[in-house]
C-alpha cells in the first residue's frame, strides 16, 4: 500500500474531489446495510403473522428509495474519484514529456525510445488505475466491511460475528504474501513490454532497410520472440493473480459454514430469531465484495507501485547540463574561443579530444575536416554545450558557454546535424519549427537560400506538402536542404553545418554556400565536411586526427603543406574529374 503514501502529494492537491467522493462512497455503504435489515424484519413479521399489505408496501418503498439514492450517489463518486485519477495521468504525462525535453544526449544513450514510450503509456495507465479504481476499491472495501461487521456485532450478535471472523487473519497474511510476489513479477512484465515496444519502434522505423536486405522473416521471428516473452511474463503475473479469488472464496465459505452451524444453535437456544439469522447471512454475503475487492486491490496496487517506481526513477534522473542561477540572458555574441586540454565522454576512459585550441573571429567561417572518428562531431557537440568541458573552456565573447542561460545559448546556434530529422508535417511546418511565428515569406526566403525553393514549388501542394514520417517522401538531398532552411530561418549568430551537404551534388553545394556567404554578413559559420570543396573558402580550417589538431590554416596554406588535407583534396578533385569524364576526354 506504499504507493498511496507516494501519491499523497496528489491526494492533497485533489482533496476536494477525493473528499467528496469518499464521503459519498461512505454514505452508499451505509445505504447498502438497509436491505438485509428490512428482509430480516419482514421474515420475523411473516413468522409472527404480523405482516400487513400496508407495511409490506412501506418496506418495498424504502427499498426502492434506497436503490434510487444508491444509483445517483454511485454516479457522483465515480465522477469525482475517476476524474481526479485522469488528471493525475495528464499531470504525470506532462511531467514526463517536460523531463524528456530537458534531458541531455547522455540520457537518451541510456534509455531506449521504446522503453520511454512504455513509461509514458502503460506505466501511467497503471498509476491512474491505482489513483482511481484503487482508491475506490480501498475505501469501498474498508467502509463496507467495517460497517457490515459493526452492524452484525451491534444489532444481531457480537459472539457470532467474532466466530465468523476467525478465518480473516489467514486472508490478511496470504494477501500480503501474494502481493509481494505480484509486485516483483509485474515489474518484470513491464520491462518485457518495454523491450517489445522498443523492438516495434525500431522495426517500423527501419522497415525499408529490412526490405532492402530481405530480412522481413527474421524481423518477424524476432518480434515473435519478444512477444512470447511478454506473454510469458504476464502469464506469471496471472498465475499469482489467479490465486486471490480461490483463496478468498475458500475463506468466505468457511465463514458461511461457521455462520450456519453456530447461528442455528443460537436460534435453537432462543438467542437469535430466524429473521436475525437471515439478516446475518445476508450481511455476511455483503462481506464477499470487500474480501474479493481486497484481493483485486492488491493486484491494482502492486501494478501501480511497480509502475510508479519506474516513473519516479525516470523523473529522478538529473540533468547533466544545467543553468547557472547567475547565467546571462543577453545574446551570445563575439569571438569564439576554444581551449580544450582534454575531453572524455562520461563513462569512457579514452580521450575523445585533446589539446584543441583556436580563436575564430565573429563573422568568420570555420571548416573542420578529418577522417571518420577524428573528433569533428564531438567538437560540435561541445560548442553547443551538449556536454560540459571539465578540462578547459569554450567562450563566446567574454563569457564561457556555461555562463549563458541554456535558452540563450540554444538561440545562438542554428544546427544542421548529420541525421536530418523531419516531422510528419508539411514542409512549411518543418521549416518553421525553429521559428514558429515565421511568415510564409520568411519561410520561402529561407528555402531560397537553401536552394530548395524550386523543388518545393514543383510539388503539387508546394509548401503544404506533407513529407511523411522522418521525411520519407523526400530524397536525401531534399531533406538536407529543408534542414538547412530550418536552421537559417531564425538567422542565428552561429550556423553549424555538420556534414550537411553530403547528399547534394557539387554544383548545388556551391550555390548553397555562396548564398550563405552573401546573406550572413557578420554571422559566424562552422562547417564540418568530408568533401573538402565545402570548406575551401573558410577563413580557418582545422584538420583533426585522433582527437587533436593535426593541421590548421586557410585552404591556400594547407595546400602548401604535404599533409592529409592536400592529399585528400587532390584525390577528391581527381575523383570529380573522373566522374565528369574530363580525364577520359583528354586521353
Image (tube, rainbow, N blue to C red):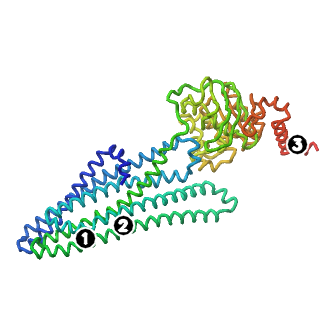
Corner quadrant of residue 59 = bottom left
Which sits in the foreground, 465 or 531? 531
Residue 375 image point, x, y percent: 70, 39
Q: Tell me the residue that label 3 is attached to.
A: 582
Residue 164: percent from left, percent from top: 22, 68
The residue depicted at 19 percent of the width and 62 percent of the height is: 33
Foreground mark, 1 or 3, reads: 1
The mark lying in front, picked from 3 and 2, is 2
Residue tagged by mark 1?
Answer: 255
Distance, label 2 to label 1, CA atoms, is 17 Å
Residue that numbered label 2 is attached to: 244
Q: Residue at x 30, y 49 (%)?
A: 18
> Horizontal placement of 354 versus 435: left or right?
right
Q: Position of residue 178 (x, y in %)?
A: 39, 63
Which mark sits nearer the N-terminus, 3 or 2?
Answer: 2
Image quadrant of residue 26?
A: bottom left
Q: Eyeballing the image, is 286 above or below 265?
A: above
Q: Nearer the viewer, residue 554 or 258?
A: 258
Amino acid at each position: 500500500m506504499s504507493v498511496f503514501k507516494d501519491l499523497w502529494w496528489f491526494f492533497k492537491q485533489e482533496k476536494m474531489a477525493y473528499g467528496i467522493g469518499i464521503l459519498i462512497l461512505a454514505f452508499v455503504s451505509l445505504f447498502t446495510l438497509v436491505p438485509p435489515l428490512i428482509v430480516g424484519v419482514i421474515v420475523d413479521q411473516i413468522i409472527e403473522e404480523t405482516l400487513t399489505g400496508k407495511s409490506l408496501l412501506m418496506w418495498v418503498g424504502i427499498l426502492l428509495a434506497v436503490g434510487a439514492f444508491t444509483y445517483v450517489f454511485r454516479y457522483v463518486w465515480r465522477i469525482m474519484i475517476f476524474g481526479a485519477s485522469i488528471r493525475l495521468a495528464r499531470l504525470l504525462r506532462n511531467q514526463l514529456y517536460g523531463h524528456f525535453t530537458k534531458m541531455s544526449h547522455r540520457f537518451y544513450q541510456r534509455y531506449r525510445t521504446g522503453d520511454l514510450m512504455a513509461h509514458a503509456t502503460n506505466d501511467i495507465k497503471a498509476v491512474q488505475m491505482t489513483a482511481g479504481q484503487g482508491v475506490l476499491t480501498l475505501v469501498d472495501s474498508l467502509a463496507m466491511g467495517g460497517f457490515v461487521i459493526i452492524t452484525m456485532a451491534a444489532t444481531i450478535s457480537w459472539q457470532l460475528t467474532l466466530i465468523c471472523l476467525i478465518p480473516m487473519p489467514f486472508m490478511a497474511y496470504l494477501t500480503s504474501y501474494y502481493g509481494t510476489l505480484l509486485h516483483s513479477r509485474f515489474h518484470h512484465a513491464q520491462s518485457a513490454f518495454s523491450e517489445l515496444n522498443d523492438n516495434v519502434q525500431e522495426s517500423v522505423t527501419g522497415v525499408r532497410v529490412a526490405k532492402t536486405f530481405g530480412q522481413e522473416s527474421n524481423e518477424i521471428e524476432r518480434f515473435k520472440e519478444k512477444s512470447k516473452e511478454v506473454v510469458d511474463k504476464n502469464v506469471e503475473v496471472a498465475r499469482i493473480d489467479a490465486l486471490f479469488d480461490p483463496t478468498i472464496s475458500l475463506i468466505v465459505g468457511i465463514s458461511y459454514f461457521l455462520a450456519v452451524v453456530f447461528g442455528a444453535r443460537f436460534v435453537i437456544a432462543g438467542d437469535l430469531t430466524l429473521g436475525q439469522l437471515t439478516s446475518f447471512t445476508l450481511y455476511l454475503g455483503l462481506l464477499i465484495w470487500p474480501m474479493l475487492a481486497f484481493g483485486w486491490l492488491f493486484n491494482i496496487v502492486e501494478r501501480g507501485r511497480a509502475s510508479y517506481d519506474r516513473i519516479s526513477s525516470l523523473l529522478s534522473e538529473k540533468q547533466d547540463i544545467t543553468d547557472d542561477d547567475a547565467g546571462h540572458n543577453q545574446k551570445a555574441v563575439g569571438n569564439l574561443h576554444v581551449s580544450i586540454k582534454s575531453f572524455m565522454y562520461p563513462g569512457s576512459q579514452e580521450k575523445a579530444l585533446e589539446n584543441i585550441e583556436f580563436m575564430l573571429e565573429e563573422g568568420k567561417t570555420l571548416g573542420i575536416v578529418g577522417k571518420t572518428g577524428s573528433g569533428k562531431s564531438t567538437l560540435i557537440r561541445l560548442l553547443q554545450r551538449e556536454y560540459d568541458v571539465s578540462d578547459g573552456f569554450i567562450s563566446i565573447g567574454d563569457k564561457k558557454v556555461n555562463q549563458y542561460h541554456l535558452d540563450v545559448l540554444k538561440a545562438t546556434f542554428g544546427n544542421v546535424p548529420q541525421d536530418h530529422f523531419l516531422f510528419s508535417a508539411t514542409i512549411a511546418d518543418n521549416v518553421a519549427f525553429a521559428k514558429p511565428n515565421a511568415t510564409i515569406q520568411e519561410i520561402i526566403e529561407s528555402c531560397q537560400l537553401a536552394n530548395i525553393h524550386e523543388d518545393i514549388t514543383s510539388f503539387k501542394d508546394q509548401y503544404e506538402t506533407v513529407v511523411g514520417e522522418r521525411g520519407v517522401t523526400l530524397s536525401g538531398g531534399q531533406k538536407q536542404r529543408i534542414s538547412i532552411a530550418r536552421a537559417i530561418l531564425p538567422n542565428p549568430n552561429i550556423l553549424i553545418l555538420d556534414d550537411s551537404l553530403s547528399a547534394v551534388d557539387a554544383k548545388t553545394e556551391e550555390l548553397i554556400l555562396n548564398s550563405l556567404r552573401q546573406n550572413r554578413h557578420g554571422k559566424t559559420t562552422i562547417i564540418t565536411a568530408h568533401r573538402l570543396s565545402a570548406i575551401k573558402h573558410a577563413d580557418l580550417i582545422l584538420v583533426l586526427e585522433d582527437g587533436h589538431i593535426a593541421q590548421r590554416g586557410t585552404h591556400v596554406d594547407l595546400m602548401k603543406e604535404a599533409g592529409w588535407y592536400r592529399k585528400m583534396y587532390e584525390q577528391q578533385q581527381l575523383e570529380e574529374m573522373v566522374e565528369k569524364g574530363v580525364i577520359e576526354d583528354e586521353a
